[in-house]
Amino acid sequence: MGSVLDKARQEPLWNTNKKIVALLAALTVFLFGFPLFGPNAFYLHLMIMIFMYAVMSQSWNVIAGLSGQISLGHGVFFGIGAYTSSFLFVEYGVTPWIGIFIGIVFSAIVAVLIGIPMLRLSGHYFAIATLLIGISFQVVFQRWELVGAASGLWIPLTEGNSWSALQFHGSKVPYYYIFLAFFIVTYLLVWRLSISKIGFRLRAVRDDYQAASSLGINVARYKIIAYAISAMIMAPMGSLFAQYLLIVDPDRMFNLEISIMVLLMTVLGGIGNIWGPLIGVAILIPVSEYSRIYFGGTGGAVDLILYGLILMLICVFRPDGLISLFPKHILERARQR
Amino acid sequence: MTFEIIAQAIVGGLLMGLIYALIAAGLSLIFGLMNIVNFAHGEHLMLSMFSSFWLWSLLGLDPLVSIPITILLMAFCGVLTHYLLIRYILKAKMLIQICATFGLSIFIRSLAQLLWTPDFRNVTEPLLEGRLEIANVFIGQPQLFAGLACLMGFALLYLFVTRTETGLALQATAQDRQAAEILGIPSNKMFALGWGIGLGCVGLAGGMMTNYFFIFTDVGVNFALFAFVAVALGGFGSIVGCLYAGIIIGLVESLGGLLIDPSFKLLYVFAIYLMVVIYKPQGLFGRY
């Protein structure tokens, strides 16, 4: 095992092809410098949504791509993150920075609690259970008086910008950099995970759980680990999104659409590849935001019709996602599996 | 709390349970046949209710009269689903199969929302109206007949699957696709037939429900969830198991709503699902 691991770790994250390195470097510089060009609020919002969904889809990619389980209610962890940090701030004045980490811990606990009974089961049972969990959470939060029931929590506004309360009025630039930082850190961590011992064991479980278990891998435990890691990636995005909107309500935070979006983006880009979710997000977020502008109030429905159609087409024609369109030699190095 | 109220809840739960059972039977048939879970099952139910509704509102056909048309329409829809989508993902990974039918469900629901708006509709003055009173327990006539129709549908389905040659061919395909092919049973046609019958069941349930249920674009979501639970409870692929499971779910839903809190109905059913999949993952009546 050791030699395989060492070999894999030597593999660079990106292609050593100079053109690709230059492209990625240029992209990084561009992302950091983007706000300096003074783009209007819409473009900043667009980029923030791209970063946010890139992280969320990556979270789904960890459970689906690495461990092969389908979660149809992944928005639950988004909601838990949002509610935890907001509730702590509204009730006890705890700074959201700490709230984010408590949210991460909470969602990991919930994931383990859900995972222990559910992940012993095969795919269909788990997928159905997550669908039920997603809707149950929304039902419970709609009626839970402590967290404001259906009207939700309103985060009290601070006077002016405040880093400690994580609120910035008048400019989206600080949000931009915060989301960007989370995006980069998440992708680095998931890459590190994918070439770690856990990552290899997870893939072994995904590809052939009987063979994996005969090698002494505790299948159920690794599935739960993957689920918990995935939840921990999702939660901070909920907290940050709550700070971005300053309102937390069950219909927004436990929206089924979140679960649909992260699934669709990952499948569109390519499941099991670290760059897959990013490709899906980079295509779908602009489509979604622009369609919201052009179709106005009915944008939601038109959006979803399109999503459903894309999802079916991808499953039929390109089950490996758009990333499979790239030339093989680039994929060889960039691949996760 | 009097005896009458509890009896009322039991009768209501029983009749609702029969509907869940027939919807679940459709799901179970498809699952048993090709190992694919139809995540768009609730949306198919919604379509069947809307087809029954439009036949009433545009052509003036009573939902009871249009039942055969609704069943045929849904059966056709099932065959279409197989030939346009499912056929291509038969050999795909389970993950892709789930995503594909999930995509279908999003597509149908959002399209319906765009075409028909999320308004609530209902059929006024249907042929089946009013209620019966037996020993202080009221039974709505539409509910009663819906329950009986579902039971009859169930009997026909059971007889078809176990007593006719085509039904046996269906079972053979479910057990071993390749062996059945060698015996000259075309599996692709069997799959299409399975989808047709599966959604035909949904057509019957939806058509009968149009008599007394509100018709709106999200109506199928809860029914589909309950059908999933019923299929897990009855044992994946077991049709008779669905009947018992559907009734159990109907009773739990209605008694739980009466005795604890009606707003958490979904959670009681979910609790059953959890218990079954943890302690008896093969289902209560599963063959495996």
Image (tube, rainbow, N blue to C red):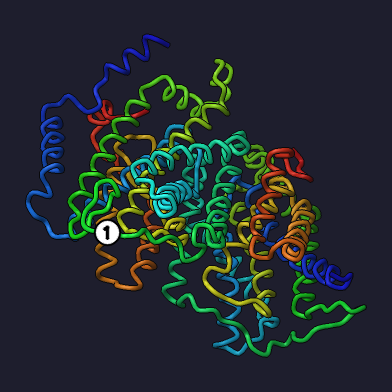
Q: Residue at x 56, y 40 (%)?
A: A123
Above or below, comparing residue A118 to residue A217 in the picture: below
Q: Is residue B18 visible?
A: no
Residue B74 appearing in the image: yes
Q: Nearer the viewer, residue B103 or B280?
A: B280
> Residue B270: x percent and y percent?
65, 52
Residue found at x 49% / y 54%: B102
Label 1: element kind: helix
Q: Nearer the viewer, residue B242 or A89?
A: A89
Position in image of residue B274 (x %, y %): 67, 45
Q: Nearer the viewer, residue A164 or A174?
A: A164
Residue, disc 1: A287
Tell me which chain the residue with mark 1 is part of. Answer: A
Q: How many marks?
A: 1
State the residue lying farthest toward the left: A37
Identify which amino acid the numbered label 1 is placed on: Val
B268 and B212: which is toward the camera: B268
